[in-house]
Image (cartoon, rainbow, N blue to C red):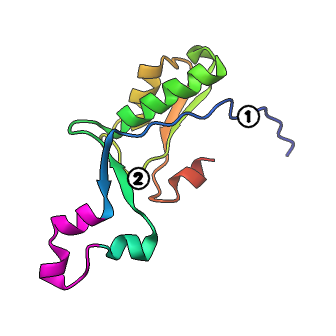
Amino acid sequence: MNMTGHSRIAAIGTYLPEKVVSSSELMDEIDSEQRFGIPNTFIEDLTGIHSRRIPADGEKPSDLAINAGRQALAKCGLDPKEVDMVLFCGIDRDWIEPATSHRVQRELGCINATCMDISNACHGFANGM
């Protein structure tokens, strides 16, 4: 079988929610020292993760993807109608059906794009690539 194609990543966009939660705040939330005898520095000491971004109340996974997608489209100057595929590779999703990528496709204006979700926990992004 002879297959040819011209796929490419034209740009990458990112979006980080504004709310920052530290590892020690998460441990304090479960009262780790009093209830379990685990210091509130445990996550940071074990993983090196100091903090993470948390979506605002009501902010859906698609909202994060739409913001990143808008940034990517702006960077490459591509008309959304020229996008051939929208993949949503997230651990969480807006709903089970339809695919979250359908909302991303609509909001970005990628009306000609095929779209699908790839859900495979932490491996979803690698599977999408």
> Quick check: 116 left or right of 19?
right
Q: Is residue 96 visible?
A: no
Foreground of the two, 121 or 75: 75
Q: Position of residue 46 (x, y in %)?
A: 42, 76
Residue 29 is a magenta residue:
yes
The extreme right residue here reads 2
Task: Give the amino acid at mark 2.
Answer: Ile
Q: Position of residue 83 (x, y in %)?
A: 61, 23
Q: Position of residue 27 (x, y in %)?
A: 23, 69
Q: Main secondary structure of the magenta part?
A: helix
Describe the element under mark 1 as helix, strand or loop: loop
The magenta stretch is 24-40
Residue 67 is a magenta residue:
no
Q: Position of residue 25 (x, y in %)?
A: 24, 61
Look at 17% across and 64% down and name the residue there.
29
Describe the element under mark 2 as helix, strand or loop: loop
Task: Give the amino acid at mark 1.
Answer: Ser
Q: Is residue 121 visible?
A: yes
Q: Residues within 10 Å of mark 1 (few under 14, many from 20)?
A: few
Foreground of the two, 4 or 51: 51
- Label 2, on which residue? 91
To which quarter of the image does residue 76 belong? top right
Foreground of the two, 115 or 15: 15
Residue 88's place in the image compared with 53, above or below, is above
Residue 129's place in the image compared with 29, above or below, is above
- Label 1, on which residue? 7
Look at 59% across and 54% down and name the residue there.
126
> Quick check: 105 left or right of 17?
right
To which quarter of the image does residue 85 belong? top right
